[in-house]
Image (cartoon, helix red, strand yellow):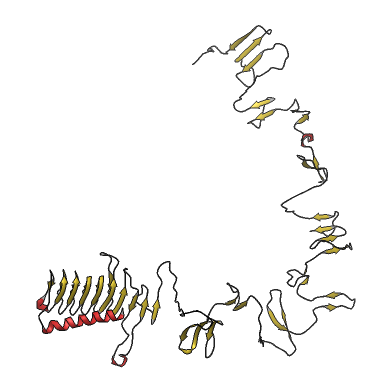
Amino acid sequence: MKKSFFILMLTGLVFSTLTKAQQCVSCYENNVNFSANASAVGQHNTATGQASFAMGNESITLGASSGAFGINSEAYAAAGFAIGRRIKSAATSAIILGTGYNFTDYLINGTYNSLMIGFNSTAPTLFVSESTTTNSAHKDRTGRIGIGNVTEPLAKLHIKADDNENAEIYLQAHVWNGSAVSSIFIGNKNHGISANGNTGLVFSSEKNYIFGKGNVGIGVEVPQAKLQVDGTVLTTGFKMPQQELRDGWVLTADHTGTAFWAPSQNLWYQTETNDVYRPAGNVGIGLNNPLSKLEVNGQVSIGYHVANVQENNLIVEGKIGIGTFSPTEKLEVNGKIKTTEFQLLNGQVNGYILQCDNNGNASWVDPSLINDGDWTILANNLYVESNRNVGIGTSTPTQPLDVAGNIKVSGNIYGGHDDWQSLKIYGDTNNNDGAHILLNSNSDETGSLKFYSTGTNGRIEFHN
């Protein structure tokens, strides 16, 4: 590709030179400004820039000494070159090589003194910027290279991945085996990173390895300290300076594992009465990281001397008090008890409920035998005393049964006598205004329905 590129560039220069010494060239339906020493080869090309050259099909050169080669290749500024298809050079000395996406989406180089290469895209794959030369003393300066859609590279080599693409650099040995090595050298060949097929990843430095910020984890993904290692550390020496040190001090640690140098001393002390104590810290039995003053991993018995106690159980002879110094029962709690389950193994029967006496002692009882003082249960019957009223929808019933709302009956409504009787439905609550419906029965075979109305204007009406 490099050879083809330089051949095309050389061709453009040759044609530009020829236009000064020989007759300008034009082929089929080309638009050429011969008075400006422009030339065109091919068809449907436009060459109007001074000493410009267009070649191919529908190529355009408008800039002085510009060149366009290919199909729909366009150069609009001086000394701009476009080589390929559906591409544009839109700045002075802007060189572009490749192909755009389609006839409406061109690959365009609009950066002065630069090279852009890309194929089947509106974004470049390779971009070379101009050098930072400001005067003749720095004429040997060079530009920067961008890989990906980078037209303003921020380093000598600036690589940018596309959307949903990882930014990766892959150094591949011809054959990966025990003798293969892939390396990146930094500064000189004594600084760098190498992947060795035999030993793995190797870091090289003439001096120090310095990590500026963050933590380093070995075997852990989220290190919590400057260096965190999940595993064994093997070293031939150890040094941990601190503000105060003395010969003979020993390494100790607090409950979080933080180590420090401290004077050598016994962990336990004995009093004159042969009591043993620790002045600070926690005591662990069966574990090395106690979180309480005393933490036991295993069985404990107090008062009893029992063998083969289940592990992590506690056996106590006597009473236990929580929130109290003088428990009166096996377990007495002064405060609230929160539990996800409750079981009382004394008189339990399916469907029974828990009831307490005046002292708070609880027991399981048959709910049908409970009398709360308002209702009385007799066999399968439930009733209230005759001097009380029952309200449905009202808290102030005035009758033995007072319903605030409608009554729906799917059966019959019976009176309170076994023999014939009258049934009255009154229009007021006091039964004394005289307006009522009377269902009158003298026997099982005779009876009447009477409607009563009170007042001088009283009447009985029938409506549909």
Q: Position of residue 46 (x, y in %)?
A: 16, 71
The residue positioned farthest toward the top in the image shown:
446
Where is residue 198? Give x, y as percent: 55, 82
Quadrant location of residue 51?
A: bottom left
**In-front residue for pair 246/421:** 246
Q: Is residue 197 left or right of residue 369?
A: left
Would residue 113 be seen by someone viewing this image from the given angle?
A: no
Judge left or right: residue 324 versus residue 205: right
Q: Position of residue 154 (x, y in %)?
A: 38, 79
Name the residue rendered at 22%, 72% in the picture: 70
Q: Residue furthest bottom?
A: 137
Is 325 displayed left or right of 439 in the figure? right
Q: Nearer the viewer, residue 162 or 200?
A: 200
**Residue 362 versus residue 52: which sits nearer the camera?**
52
Task: Depth check: give the residue in front, 234 or 274.
Answer: 234
Residue at 33%, 83% in the rendered image: 143
- For image coordinates 29% across by 79% down, the residue present is 114
